[in-house]
Image: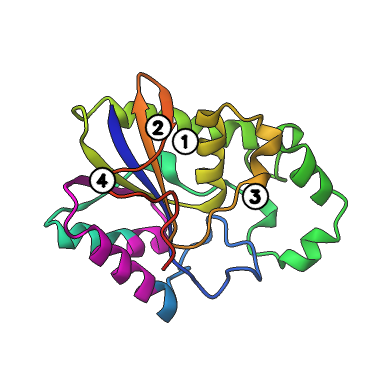
């Protein structure tokens, strides 16, 4: 069984205002950088074997201090990348909420595909397969850090908890939060790893 810490990247200036998606050059703001440093401090005494990140800058900037504290390199794992929001990327969230598709996103995400973008079901399959493949690379009880994005983490958590994809929006993953996952043969278990937390608030 491999222990995986799923970490949402720290805060950035687009958070809560616009849908950043896969836009380039979205960096951590000052508070986000402080959150990343705090995470590194929290994990400094933990036996982290590897640090993986989404290819996007804000995720890599969150992962870097953790990796440095363990003398590791950040490894890019494409499966951890944010959902491809297509034409919705960069759009104002308040405006999107007034659109005719927002209720579908919230209530029936299994039926939705972002315009010129990805389906939720495909994003879930991508991250789940990526995490299972990653778990097969490490020995039992190894501790691995994966830095990703809110929806991607929620989709993974929903799958391993046996939740319907249409209910994944009920989960809340805050910036710089930590979700502990143990993988065993493709099955997921959530619980304490060395210390008790399902979400570490920074």
Where residue 194 is drawn, which disc sits there? 4
**Circle 1 sits in a helix, a strand or a loop, which is it?**
helix
Q: In percent of the image, x 45 and y 54: which residue is there? A: 199
Q: In percent of the image, x 21 and y 30: which residue is there? A: 138
Q: Residues within 10 Å of mark 4 (few under 14, many from 20)?
A: few
> How far, Cα to Cα, is label 3 from label 2?
22 Å
**On the rendered structure, is 46 left or right of 97?**
left
Q: Earlier in the sequence, mark 1 or mark 3?
A: 3
> How far, Cα to Cα, is label 3 from label 4?
40 Å
- How far across and down, in percent of the image, does residue 5 sit? 35, 46
Q: Earlier in the sequence, mark 4 or mark 2?
A: 2
> How far, Cα to Cα, is label 1 from label 3?
18 Å
Q: Earlier in the sequence, mark 1 or mark 4?
A: 1
Q: Residues within 10 Å of mark 2 (few under 14, many from 20)?
A: some
| Residue ID for mark 2 | 130
Q: Report whether residue 113 is seen.
A: yes
| Residue ID for mark 1 | 127
Q: Locate the N terminus and report the quarter of the image it occupies.
A: top left
Marks 2/1 in contact by CB < 8 Å: the verdict is yes
**Circle 4 sits in a helix, a strand or a loop, which is it?**
loop
Give the residues drawn in magenta, as a range.
Answer: 33-62
Q: Nearer the viewer, mark 4 or mark 2?
A: 4
Q: In percent of the image, x 58 and y 47: which residue is there? A: 84
Q: Earlier in the sequence, mark 3 or mark 2?
A: 3
Q: In percent of the image, x 62 and y 31: which residue is there? A: 121
| Residue ID for mark 3 | 86
């Amino acid at each position: 069984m491999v222990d995986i810490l799923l970490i949402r990247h720290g805060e950035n200036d687009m958070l809560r205002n616009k849908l950043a998606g896969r836009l380039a050059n979205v960096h951590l703001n000052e508070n986000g950088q402080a959150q990343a440093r705090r995470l590194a401090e929290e994990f400094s005494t933990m036996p982290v074997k590897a640090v993986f990140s989404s290819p996007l800058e804000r995720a890599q900037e969150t992962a870097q201090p953790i990796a440095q504290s363990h003398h590791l390199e950040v490894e890019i794992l494409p499966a951890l990348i944010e959902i491809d929001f297509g034409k919705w990327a960069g759009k104002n969230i308040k405006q999107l909420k007034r659109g005719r598709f927002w209720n579908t996103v919230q209530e029936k995400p299994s039926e939705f595909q972002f315009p010129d973008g990805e389906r939720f079901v495909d994003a879930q399959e991508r991250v789940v397969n990526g995490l299972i493949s990653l778990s097969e690379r490490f020995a039992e009880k190894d501790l691995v850090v994966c830095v990703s994005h809110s929806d991607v983490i929620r989709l993974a958590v929903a799958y391993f908890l046996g939740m319907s994809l249409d209910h994944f929006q009920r989960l809340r993953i805050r910036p710089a939060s930590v979700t502990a996952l143990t993988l065993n043969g493709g099955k997921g278990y959530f619980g304490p790893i060395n210390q008790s937390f399902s979400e570490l608030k920074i």
